[in-house]
Image (cartoon, grey):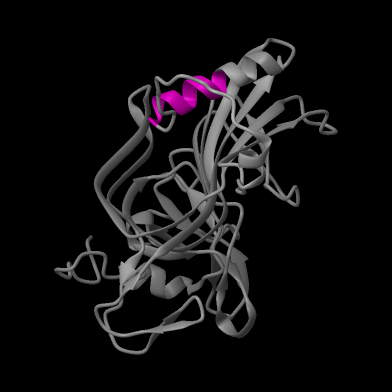
Amino acid sequence: MRQQAYGYAAVTLFCLGIAPVALAELKPISEETMGEVTGQAFMQIENIQDIPGNPHEFTRMTLTMDVETRMNVDDVQAGELDGGVDFAAQHVALGHIARNDGQQFNGRTYSAGDTVHFEAFKPYIELAEDPAEGKLSGFRMGFGQARGSVSSLTSSFSGDIGLKLVDGSGQEFDATLFDENTQATNYRASYIGIDDGTADCASGTNCAPLTHLQSLYVGEAGADGVTDFTNDFFIGFQREGVEWQSPDGANVINAGKGVFINLPTSMKVDMSQLISQGVDRLQTHRDDMGTQLF
């Protein structure tokens, strides 16, 4: 099974274009020359097996590199099948530009026009294999540590958004994803709200379209309001349900069949604001597109 997993890994890395091809003659070097060489492995490969209660075996390939980026994608669709789309969004962006002087994030203060990068350390690709069948059950791409803004105009979402919503009485709830019939779901959802038995997406009661959530910060709550890094930000593609473990083994995320995006955030939003005004979009282009795209 392990040999097959390495085979999947090789194919995946080749397709991503990060497996360079070189034609060169191999010559031995002296021990003296070797002694002058220091460095760190570019890639680390882990085999994760025999997890109690988990039927899958995993192979994780981690690149020892750090990335700071600000990027925009006009249109994204993933998981088109059976007349629907697992994830569909326009104007997707990682990172943003400070609109005003004094904006704070990551423990830093930015001036208007400064780039606030999306920070991603130790990117990895992980494969899940069913040892009983000898088949690939899924793979995911994520980061050992990540934090920063994610913006989009999302019409269909599969996965989990770790947002906290506050109702009129001040009580906090974990945000729930809904379909157009106000059925709680993490598959092709188009609404988000509070699942307290009163939600009605048709009338806008404790429920708002996902298009109202135009920007959020990926990360965990830190001291003094600073957003800390998270290791649970990833996008997975599953042939069947897979229980993915955090890189540090602390959490287990159950991802269903198809596309699954895990967006951990420490943000809290008033439900009434999300319904009536939405969450403003951060500036993601040099020419400011405005705070609302819906």
Q: Which corner quadrant of the image does residue 149 belong to?
A: bottom left
Which of these two is toward me, 35 or 124?
Answer: 35
- Depicted 196 relative to depicted 156: above or below: below
**Depth check: 69 or 78 in front?**
69
Residue at the farthest bottom position: 102
| Viewer-nearest residue: 63 or 189 | 63
Q: Residue at x 53, y 78 (%)?
A: 168
The magenta stretch is 8-17
Q: Residue, x 26% and y 83% (percent of image)?
A: 112
Q: Quadrant of the C terminus?
A: bottom left
Any part of residue 250 in sight:
yes
In the rendered image, the quadrant that contains the N terminus is top right
Give the overall secondary structure of the magenta segment.
Answer: helix
Residue lying at the far left of the rendered structure: 287
Q: Quick check: 279 above or below 83?
A: below
Question: Where is residue 245 shown, x and y percent of the image?
Answer: 69, 42
Residue 184 in sight from this viewpoint: no
Q: Which image quadrant is residue 136 in?
A: top right
> Considering depth in this image, is 73 or 20 the residue closer to the camera?
20
Residue 252 at x, y percent in the picture: 71, 45
Q: Is residue 188 left or right of residue 214?
A: right
Residue at point 34%, 62% (across, down): 214
The relative height of residue 289 versus residue 222 in the rendered view (above or below) is: above
The picture places residue 154, in percent across and down from the top left corner, at 33, 50
